[in-house]
Image (spheres, coloured by chain):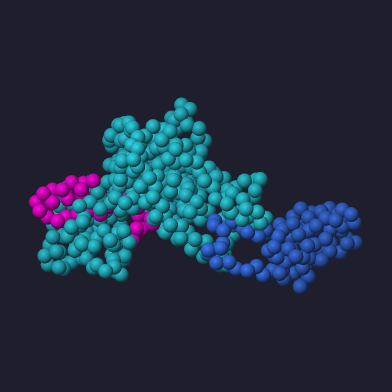
Chain colours: A cyan, B blue
Amino acid sequence: MVKIQQQVLALTGDEAVAYAVKQSEVDVVAAYPITPQTIIVERFSEYVYNGEVDTEFVCTESEHSALTACLTAAATGARTFTASASAGLALMHEILYVTSGCRAPVVMTIVNRALSAPINIHCDHTDSMVERDACWIQFYAENSQEAYDSVIQAFRIAENPDILLPTMVMLDAFFISHTLESVKVFPDEVVRKFVGTRRIPMVRSHEGKLVPFKLDPENPITMGPFDIYDYYFEHKRQQEEAMQRALQIIKQVHDEYEKISGRRYGNGLIEPYRLEDAEIAIICIGSAAGTTKTVVDQLRAQGTKAGLLRLRVYRPLPVQDIINALKNVKAIAVMDRSHSFGAHGGPIFHEIRHILYDAPIHPKIVGYIYGLGGRDMPENLIHQIYNDLEKILETKRVEKPVHFIGVRE
Amino acid sequence: MIKQRGWKEVPTAGVCWVPATEYITGDWRTFKPKLEQAKCNKCLMCYIYCPDGAVEWRPEVGEIEFNYKYCKGCGICANECRQEAIKMVLE
């Protein structure tokens, strides 16, 4: 194993993302500013101005146009990147589906921010959870380092000819995006070599020729045309297949990255923390996992068998990995930083309970909605969740399956 | 009739594997444009307006001709014809 000398920089999450994009040799960046994502494209525009990158930077008039520009550039074979958050991502909604449908491997970071109204610029996961069905691969980073690492990996994963799906890398507003941390970064040429140039698969055109899968006047093809009940369903079925293939490729890219970085995030899909013999466990995504790890350590020091399962990848959902990781757990709390109004709990809670229905294990499961609009999730509240789980373990009963934690009565 | 392929055979992203010329749109038609050559002054408005390129100009004979393989029978040509040389007749 050849470890590469890495430099430690003091970077915020947004700056770490911009740095990773700079090193990934992106052809086109089109963006529209929105807090708390703005610093990403601000820093990147400085790289462009200083001539540190050879990227076409497009300032668009809206997020809808920003993603459209990325989608169309990606369709010509370019490597593309954009970033957004909250209302900006919501405005992209239509084009998210067009991008995945055209199999355009755009990479986008979302700095998770609440949706209005009332207007709020702080962290919750509602914006990207709304888009979980758009056929974009979704990563949720725990800290700035992981945001940097995940963006570099995202280009490799999205552009893999067996996947060709757009990919979102999420980081929590302010908790990660604006917090200065020490981040280990590679020399530019290491990232350039790791990401490589975009490989374009071949496709049979309407002229019967085998041509590169990109818009090219020399070898014309048509992408995303009118596609009614006779073929639309087949194309959607292909997208599901690509999602399932991504599970394996995400792991491979993550393993390969570890060889040069020395860093791992579980198996690349899920990150269990002291979960092997845990009886009670929390499942969460994003920066809350960092606080939860501290609480798990405190509980372990007192002899409580507590653990954590962090989902690094939410789409595709690593179903089998989750089931295997939870095999010894008797009571689970699923933390959602978003809510599906009128439903029975948050989206991650739904899916965890759903996938365990056919699993050989049947632990008790409760859901907690927390931290909406950037409400803090301190250690004492996480202790409270583990206390509730201990009670469930004793009584073997779930009094109330869905809770709102950290909200004033 | 083009054979319908399964999802494992279809190119991704809706890439067309046959040219659009193999999609015969002429059978959509209810009304058919009919030209009275004597009234036609060769202004070619019908040729310009046809959304399907189904009006063909034949320079060798100096006449226009409808391509019924693709003409959907929309009637735009008849509507635009200043000479009223095109009539839409039931198929």
**How many labels, in total?**
0
Q: Position of residue B65 (x, y in %)?
A: 83, 60
Let me know if residue B22 is in the magenta part.
no
The residue depicted at 17 percent of the width and 50 percent of the height is: A296
Q: Is residue A55 above or below residue B69?
A: above
Q: Is residue A136 visible?
A: yes
Q: Find the magenta span and give its range.
A: A290-319
**Is residue A305 on the magenta stretch?**
yes
Taking the spot 48% from the left edge, 48% from the top edge, the residue there is A159
Q: Position of residue A150 (x, y in %)?
A: 37, 44
Viewer-closest of B61 and A216: A216
Q: Quadrant of the C terminus of chain B?
A: bottom right
Residue A90 is left or right of residue A381, and the answer is right
The location of residue A313, given as percent across then percent down, is 35, 52
In the depicted view, which residue is nearer to us: A263 or A27? Answer: A263
Q: Outermost residue, left direction?
A: A302
Please name the residue shown 11% across and 49% down the image.
A301
The image quadrant where one finds the N terminus of chain B is bottom right
**From where the camera sits, is residue A123 visible?**
no
Which of B89 and B56 lies nearest the eye of the viewer?
B56
Tell me residue A193's x, y (percent): 44, 38
Give the quarter of the image for residue B77. Answer: bottom right
